[in-house]
Amino acid sequence: MKTSNIKKTYINKILGTLAIALLSDYLSSAQISNSQLSTNWGIPLYGVQLSIGTTNTNLTIDSTNTILVRIKNVSTNNIYIAGIDLIRTTLVLTNNFGRTYRLTPDILHSGRYISIPSNYFPYTQKLDAGTIFEDQLPIVIGKDIQTGDYDLKCVQHFAIAKEGDVYRVESNYLKVQIK
């Protein structure tokens, strides 16, 4: 009798784990899959590189588009980032005529928009040597941006020590079309 209960418990755990794995696969299929992206990395700075990608390079005005941002640490040092989000990460569109649009917001302070200094945030999220950190940024292309062909670039900051100097790394350029 005890053996039978142990077997049932074991089988239930296996089935539960399988159900969670299947649900996780199903939910992540709606997100950007790494296998669907070509990985082009920006120029390394102190062994740190930045890459952006998307599953659809046709970005639609006034709707949410998802950009995958990846930071690769190929140095022998751990680095620290403040995180990837719409405040700490800069996304810039540039058209063929050199006109640029910043897709991530500036902060409104005393009625004026200001850029946030890169050393404003605590750089506490550790990225070990030899690892890649990635996150997805949902962005909305504003109605003020004209349709056409653009280069999309990302800028991110990192520190080699928690309280150390902050460095700016740039991603690859991603060719996108705004519709």
Image: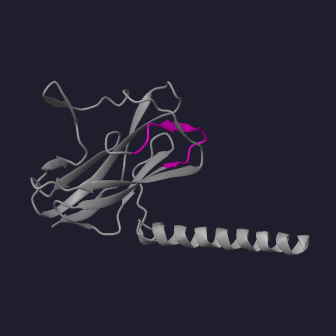
Image-based side of 151 in relation to 10, left or right: left
Q: Residue at x 30, y 56 (%)?
A: 173
Where is residue 48 shown, x and y percent of the image? Answer: 48, 44
Image-based side of 59 in relation to 20, left or right: left
Magenta segment includes 75? yes
Callout count: 0
Where is residue 121 shown, x and y percent of the image? Answer: 40, 30
Q: Is residue 62 above or below residue 165?
A: below
Q: Residue at x 42, y 55 (%)?
A: 41
Q: Looking at the figure, which quarter contains the C terminus? A: bottom left
Residue range (magenta): 72-84
Q: Is residue 29 above or below residue 124?
A: below
Figure quadrant of residue 57: bottom left
Foreground of the two, 36 or 105: 105
Magenta segment includes 116? no
Q: Looking at the figure, which quarter contains the N terminus? A: bottom right
- Return the residue found at the far front: 1
Where is residue 150 shown, x and y percent of the image? Answer: 19, 60
Where is residue 54 shown, x and y percent of the image? Answer: 35, 64
Dominant SS in magenta: loop
